[in-house]
Amino acid sequence: MRVVFIHPHGSNWLGGQKDISSIFNLMPPLGMLSIAALLEQNGIQVEVIDCYATPLTSEALVDRIITNPPDAVGFSCTTSSFLEGYRIAALLKERRPEIVIVAGGTHACTIGPPLLDSFPAIDCLVIGEGEQTMLELAQAGFRDIAAIPGVAFRGADGKGTLAAQRELVANLDDLPFPAYRRLPLFPKRYNLPLFSYPTAPNTSIISSRGCPYACSYCDRSVFSRGFRFNSPEYIVEHVAMLNRDYGIRHVSFYDDLFTFDRSRVAEFCELKEKKGLKVTYNCIARLEHVDRELLALLKRSGCWQVNFGIESGDPEVLRKHRKFFDLDEVGRKLLLVRQAGMRVKGLFMVGLPGEDEPAIRRTIDYALSLPLDEINVTKFTPFPGAPIYKAIREHGDFDENWSLMNCLNFVFVPHGMTKVQLEGLYDEFIRRFYHRSRIHWGYTRMLWRSPHSMFTFLRHLPEILAFEMKQKW
């Protein structure tokens, strides 16, 4: 039994423009690598093709696969990459119809069995966490799939149906570490966002699954709202393995709620210190989870940067879309992070339902008032699995173009606004934040704090300038 996994790129980054983001920010497909690792552990041959790291045309990719045809090809797709993945799947089916095509990932999980009704080249879907479901499919030779929980297949009437719900993995420590070794260019081709790390090589880790919160814009269809996590011992050994086998010197915990369980974080920090593991890290935290004592622990164990999802500086917008927090308290918490000696990054969103120009301007002014080192601003995208999705057209105009649904395009425009208006406010947000002497001085310090970032930036300066010129025109 042999399975090839494909992580399709998604061709529409910004309305058809060249994607330069993957030059400066490319993380390994951890979900796919976790499934591949479990299959390998059980004697199944696997190959992983990450189209972000090794871009190929659909035709070239299919040619490569059928030179040594596998029993099955599995696709892990976001909403924006699904149609490109399907083009590859359709070409494979046309040339080698005996190859079983399996689709998983967030888009398959959010649309569910009805996806099979419109995309005939796909034989089945993996719904929910994919490790055990994909293993059982492979062990069954991709036959009698109706008996396997977590699989969506075509019933006797030709319509998509779910075999049964797959239970969540109870103990994440039972899973092997992701199969990083299946990425031929790891870690050289992979890199965290520029200026968000002190050294290279670096990579990302996910040490928990699920989220108990119910923000309107978040899709929880794969891991659900429960919260499960790896033990501190598992995490430390994971980091140690990356350092030992791949020379990784910095990791970013990509968990939404790394600091949710305080005792776990404290034990991780203590174990990492005790082991003398000289690997720095970043994490994402919620404001209500951090205090001076915890921040001191994070800093002492090598934390370099803490990211916070702030989203908006307008109280009414926050009340509608996520758990409300005191905006004055945000500044105090961020200042504690800075005082502890770590960088602070704020994550914001523009174009939420109910926003108007004054609300967005309040967010911009608020962001400029905070002690942030950098920001990331996304364009609100109503994904099919998010709570807001079902009623989204009541709040504005929604162009449900899957290829553009990547948080880099305004596919949704709130009532009373225009796309041109949103784009202008978005550009103003970025410009006003970064065109300040304090921020310029912060990046000047990166010459010695993150020399690899500066070298990478300068090496690709011609591509950056070409992109900027195209943006202006």
Image (spheres, rainbow, N blue to C red):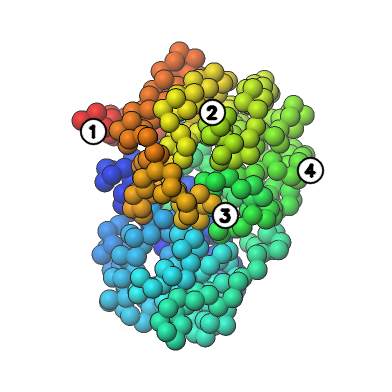
Q: Nearer the viewer, residue 122 or 442?
A: 122
Q: Calculate the distance from the C-alpha at mark 2 to the C-alpha at mark 1.
A: 33 Å
Q: Residues within 10 Å of mark 1 (few under 14, many from 20)?
A: few
Q: Determine whether, in the image, residue 407 is placed left or right of residue 317.
A: left
Asked whether disc 4 touches disc 1, contact meaning CB atoms under 8 Å apart, the reply is: no
Q: Residues within 10 Å of mark 2 (few under 14, many from 20)?
A: some
Q: Residue at x 42, y 68 (%)?
A: 115
Q: Residues within 10 Å of mark 3 (few under 14, many from 20)?
A: many
The picture places residue 42, in percent across and down from the top left corner, at: 60, 73
Q: Determine whether, in the image, residue 321 is placed left or right of residue 355.
A: right
Question: Tag 2, which secondary structure?
Answer: loop
Q: Residue at x 39, y 38 (%)?
A: 415
Q: Nearer the viewer, residue 389 or 245?
A: 389
Q: Which mark is residue 314?
A: 2
Going by the numbered disc 4, the residue's amino acid type is Ser
Q: Earlier in the sequence, mark 2 or mark 4?
A: 4
Q: Earlier in the sequence, mark 3 or mark 4?
A: 3
Which residue, given by chain and number where applicable, does mark 4 sit on? Answer: 263
Which residue, given by chain and number where applicable, does mark 1 sit on? Answer: 470
The picture places residue 75, in percent across and down from the top left corner, at: 43, 65
Which residue, given by chain and number where applicable, does mark 3 sit on? Answer: 220
Going by the numbered disc 2, the residue's amino acid type is Asp
Instruction: Kindly tell me whether residue 326 is visible in this rendering.
Output: yes
The picture places residue 271, in percent across and down from the top left corner, at: 76, 43
Question: Tag 4, which secondary structure?
Answer: helix
